[in-house]
Amino acid sequence: MKNVGFVGLGTMGKPMAEHLLANGFRVTVFNRTKARAEELVSRGASVASTPAEAASDADVVITMVSDDAAIGEVYDGTEGLLAKARPGTTIIDCSTISADLARKLGERLTKASIRFLDAPVTGSKQAAESGTLVFMVGGDAAVIEEHRDVFEAMGNKIIHMGPHGSGAATKLAHNTMVAIHNVALAEAMAIAAAAGVDPKSFLEVVTAGAAYSKAAEIKGPKLLAGDWSVQFGLALMLKDLKLATGFADRLGVPTPMMSAAKSLFQTAQQSGLGTLDLSAVAQVYEQWINRTFHADQNNK
Amino acid sequence: MKNVGFVGLGTMGKPMAEHLLANGFRVTVFNRTKARAEELVSRGASVASTPAEAASDADVVITMVSDDAAIGEVYDGTEGLLAKARPGTTIIDCSTISADLARKLGERLTKASIRFLDAPVTGSKQAAESGTLVFMVGGDAAVIEEHRDVFEAMGNKIIHMGPHGSGAATKLAHNTMVAIHNVALAEAMAIAAAAGVDPKSFLEVVTAGAAYSKAAEIKGPKLLAGDWSVQFGLALMLKDLKLATGFADRLGVPTPMMSAAKSLFQTAQQSGLGTLDLSAVAQVYEQWINRTFHADQNNK
Amino acid sequence: MKNVGFVGLGTMGKPMAEHLLANGFRVTVFNRTKARAEELVSRGASVASTPAEAASDADVVITMVSDDAAIGEVYDGTEGLLAKARPGTTIIDCSTISADLARKLGERLTKASIRFLDAPVTGSKQAAESGTLVFMVGGDAAVIEEHRDVFEAMGNKIIHMGPHGSGAATKLAHNTMVAIHNVALAEAMAIAAAAGVDPKSFLEVVTAGAAYSKAAEIKGPKLLAGDWSVQFGLALMLKDLKLATGFADRLGVPTPMMSAAKSLFQTAQQSGLGTLDLSAVAQVYEQWINRTFHADQNNK
Amino acid sequence: MKNVGFVGLGTMGKPMAEHLLANGFRVTVFNRTKARAEELVSRGASVASTPAEAASDADVVITMVSDDAAIGEVYDGTEGLLAKARPGTTIIDCSTISADLARKLGERLTKASIRFLDAPVTGSKQAAESGTLVFMVGGDAAVIEEHRDVFEAMGNKIIHMGPHGSGAATKLAHNTMVAIHNVALAEAMAIAAAAGVDPKSFLEVVTAGAAYSKAAEIKGPKLLAGDWSVQFGLALMLKDLKLATGFADRLGVPTPMMSAAKSLFQTAQQSGLGTLDLSAVAQVYEQWINRTFHADQNNK
């Protein structure tokens, strides 16, 4: 079986590494907080002290870190994984990073005879735990095929998007849709509620037909319950929308819908909702119409 | 079995009437073009010469016409259904009309001891033919229950939204979401395509996960095929967005997302796309990025 | 000198009538609250008991009322001015009404051999008092010339816009610009203030150069003082933006800027700012950046 | 008199240097294309071969270059002005650069005992030639006072905005207003024109009253003439709007108006209008309403 280095054992990374172990891969893990890495020893993982060590004997290295800055920390420097990764190794980054960084990493690693794939995922903690992530992958199709076994251990859909950077670009465009769907639900529910329609019945109509969105199915019940517990944080989505705006601006694509959504998420952030679930953008509309979508409040 | 009068045998109305006949109701139909009404005689329908005649012996009258103006034509005047509808009759309007008209009709008919439900549907011609429409109904819950058999003959979901006008209000808010979902798909696909991502792969990601919408599932393949054949016309959706804008303005609900979408549909209309499917709003983005989402063109 | 009937002695109408009297016209005035009309007797006005009476002996009738509904009240019915206006009379409406109503009035009065001009004004109470109003006039150029003396008694600029309804259309488009200029100032000041720039200095730059607008000159000092006393009410501007939206929607003009401005004014209205000056839309931005443009507050 | 180094003799820089010479300052100029520098010798200027040389004996160094990247080129390296500028020298940057760079330059130079002012200007080539520029200055008020004579040689208004970076921040917010005013004019004129109002008369109303903006006064006649000759290029304004968006995003200010304007300028750019004057954004509206504001075309 392949030797896999795994760097970054956060909410998503840890269950991903567990699935690799469960599927028989030899996995060497690195995490900044070492204790979290050691939790995987009983499942068969080796623990590395540096990213470099995790990469030194690996056929494949997977990185799952927080952002562009963290990539620099684990790839570069004397302890970085590039210090020890051998020519021929494949590095798969599953983090959500900027498309520019992914493209540049691809070019740089190719020159060093290291294969690179930018492979961010769609799916939450639950999908990581159940091994049903969707990978959107930028890079060489042959490299993807060579490591299909690695991807399939962690997810159930591996989609080739195009050259280096395409995976990251897809993730930004994808998240833009999620953001817009959330505000679309809130705005439509506000119109309906202001007209005297019961929010619960409105959601029932939405999920039954042509207006259905995954966002409505997942977040709609949260709006009805006034439950803002975090699945995907509002501040994080706002950060993605700002990244996507800069990205679209460089590409020269007019984005009236994303811009309108971004202003609403920014408004929510300014109202102190940043630490809540992204669906809390609906509270902006609740304030506007001076009532909530929450059942108890509606009975007032 | 109940006697049902059915007024308006268009694309939606005719299969709805056929389901009533198939379920054993005695149905008297009226249509402006009489030939279309006579096509139902072989299935057991009686043909009326006026709306009034269709209503004269009915327990329930269903109207399915094009807009507010058409309601006036079939309800009022010496040949209108109100000229002959008996006290105690239930009139169910399934047209997409303004919430104000629905509310006023409800008040007026109640005074005349006629029961009224505004019950627009979500679902296309296919749903009408397969009897799987979703009804969003405004009016008295008890009246809905009394005629559940009638609704269930034509649809598989009957949702009570609130008082008179709530059905029509729901339809407007619902269609707003459909419009926004369509432009969200187009905008995200434009960002992805401009970044070099294959549109087909992008759609695969969208429909696989958190960015899924019914609009993406139904219209996405049309974008990839450059197939603008009409399922729901662009000009019609623009009309609904204008109605919804006026409605939200009267309610005092800020609608930044709907407004942005309306400007895009209006732009599409001004470019001569009004007679195409509403998904053709994507062509506005195609022009902006100077390429199409259509596979053949992409290969250029 | 011409006999002038004058209907509607509100904030604007009364000083306009006074200027006609001061310029030697014989003026017969009507106002719903008769006491206000009688205040003009000492200046030489005759007082009519009905609009009809004000029109009965007039060469020119001027109407200055609040909205479309008020037009119906003073023009129609047995006491309405059309009941007594003679063929050949010229009726000049200076109210802000919908372009559709102005166009229809023009057609209807022309058939009755009465000449009609829709002539709304730009300029506040101060301009009415100093006789420096700007008239934007729809109708026949020759009729405007014939009554240039009447216009010049009240204003210093008389601009022919086009056929009946053009005056009203111009007023809506004009007010749209005023609304947008106000939110542009607020948004730019919010960016500057959030960056640590002194609002007073920022306004000095704005009014000194290429970013100058009349709105910035007039409303800027109000923002710096936190003075929301009414020059033009926020709720009134929101009403105009809704009228303008319906108008543009009927014309088929995409209006992304006006729509964005309307959402902001609606947001302000929902926050309880409707009774303040329209410049209070800036408070929406103040809440967003969690500080005011008002000097005392800035020192906190 | 003070010794002044002047780096960057473009459209704006050259007349600014000429005014310094005319006011008796000893000026040493540097320009990448040396021939342009030598044109100033007859007016008394000395010509330097490097920015360093221009700074070596200067009390004040003024830089007027194109963007952030150009700042790096003239400030840094062995030939850069910082290689020779003496402690106590004041460097005044009049370029339009990012607020972040200006703030960082301020911090860095202060540590090197060099005084820094970010002092971008509002006003075009004409204002530079007539010595009537407006300076918006970030930095220490005492330093501004010390060099008031330098500023007054080139402009007629010197406004202190706040600490380092405030000048640059003001410039971005200022240009945002200019952009919005231009699209406001285009949108209002489109509504008016679509309603049959003569564009020339509409502009007359706008410039006569409450809807007046400097943009309308300067650009309005260009719209009526179809004259898109460049005063301030459309692509340049789009670049500024993207900078301002990134800036506002970092500050956390919702910017619905600027975003809507940016989408319109981006649309114009995608239509090939980038090399025209920024007022050509009006052509987007002309295409939408299928007619031009240009008189000849209107007569069709």
Image (cartoon, coloured by chain):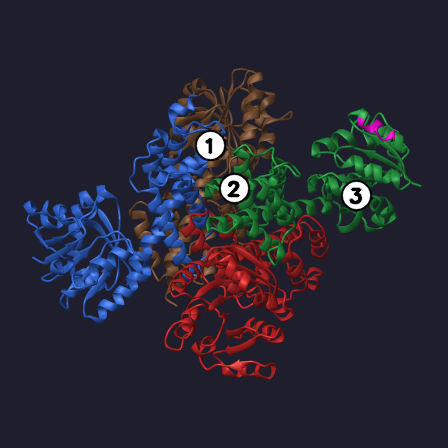
Chain colours: A red, B green, C brown, D blue
Front position in the image: B257 or B101: B257
- Residue C50 appears left or right of B193: right
Q: Quadrant of residue B87?
A: top right
Give the CA distance from mark 3 to mark 1: 48 Å
Any magenta on residue B39?
yes
Give the CA distance from mark 3 to mark 2: 44 Å
Tell me: residue B190, above or below residue D115. above
Identity, as a three-letter code, of the amino acid under mark 2 = Leu
Identity, as a three-letter code, of the amino acid under mark 1 = Ala
Badge 3 is on which residue? B130
Query: Crowdedness of circle 3 by 10 Å Cα count: few (<14), some, many (20+)?
Result: some
Query: Crowdedness of circle 2 by 10 Å Cα count: few (<14), some, many (20+)?
Result: many
Q: Secondary structure at mark 3?
A: helix
Front position in the image: B190 or B31: B190
CB atoms of marks 1 and 2 within 8 Å: no
Identity, as a three-letter code, of the amino acid under mark 3 = Ser
Badge 1 is on which residue? D192
Badge 2 is on which residue? C241
Circle 3 or circle 2, nearest the eye:
3
Mostly what secondary structure, the magenta segment? helix
CB atoms of marks 3 and 2 within 8 Å: no
